[in-house]
Image (cartoon, grey):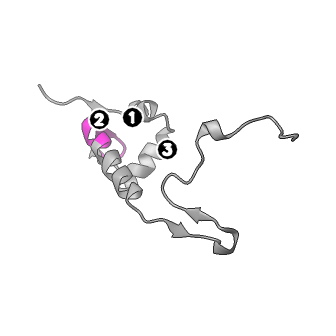
Amino acid sequence: MPELLLRTREVAERLRVRPSTIRGWAREGVIPEVRINHKVRRFSWPAVLAAIERRTARIERRPTVECGAANGIRLGPGFLPSAGQFTNEVDRG
């Protein structure tokens, strides 16, 4: 059975981004596309997922970068604190 190709809007909905983001990623070569004509593009869902997984793996392997060493700031993959580290309470100790 041939693979079902998705429209730009359908891929955007699955990834929870705007259709313009999908068009930009396709134009930049981030995700593969099938051009039907100069206006119509379609996407293979397994190919889109594989491209995103490859890109994510490559980004996660990037080394940590020293940034503002005087302030002790280091940025790298996962530099954001987890959601549990934020609180709305003020320490009145």
Q: Quadrant of residue 92?
A: top right
Marks 1 and 3, how far apart at CA = 11 Å
Q: Is residue 44 magenta?
A: yes
Residue 17, how many percent across, how many down?
50, 38
* Residues shaded magenta: 35-49
Query: The residue tagged with tag 1: helix, strand or loop?
Result: helix
Query: The residue tagged with tag 2: helix, strand or loop?
Result: helix
Marks 2 and 3, how far apart at CA = 17 Å
Find the residue positioned furthest to the top.
Answer: 1
Q: Are marks 1 and 2 in contact (CB under 8 Å)?
A: yes
Q: Nearer the viewer, mark 1 or mark 3?
A: 1
Within 10 Å of the Cα at label 2, are there few (<14), some (14-19), or many (20+) other Cα atoms?
A: many
Is residue 79 visible in the rendered structure shown here?
yes
Name the residue rendered at 55%, 54% in the picture.
Answer: 79
Residue identifier under label 3: 20
Residue identifier under label 1: 11
Name the residue rendered at 83%, 39% in the picture.
Answer: 90
Point out which mark residue 45 bears: 2
- In this rendered view, identify the residue nearer to me: 56 or 1: 56
Amino acid on which disc 2 is placed = Trp
Q: Nearer the viewer, mark 2 or mark 3?
A: 2
Q: Is residue 41 magenta?
A: yes
- Left or right, 67 with respect to 17, comes to right
Amino acid on which disc 1 is placed = Val
Q: Earlier in the sequence, mark 1 or mark 2?
A: 1
Q: Are marks 2 and 3 in contact (CB under 8 Å)?
A: no
Q: Is residue 59 above or below residue 91?
A: below
Find the residue positioned furthest to the bottom.
Answer: 70
Marks 1 and 2, how far apart at CA = 7 Å
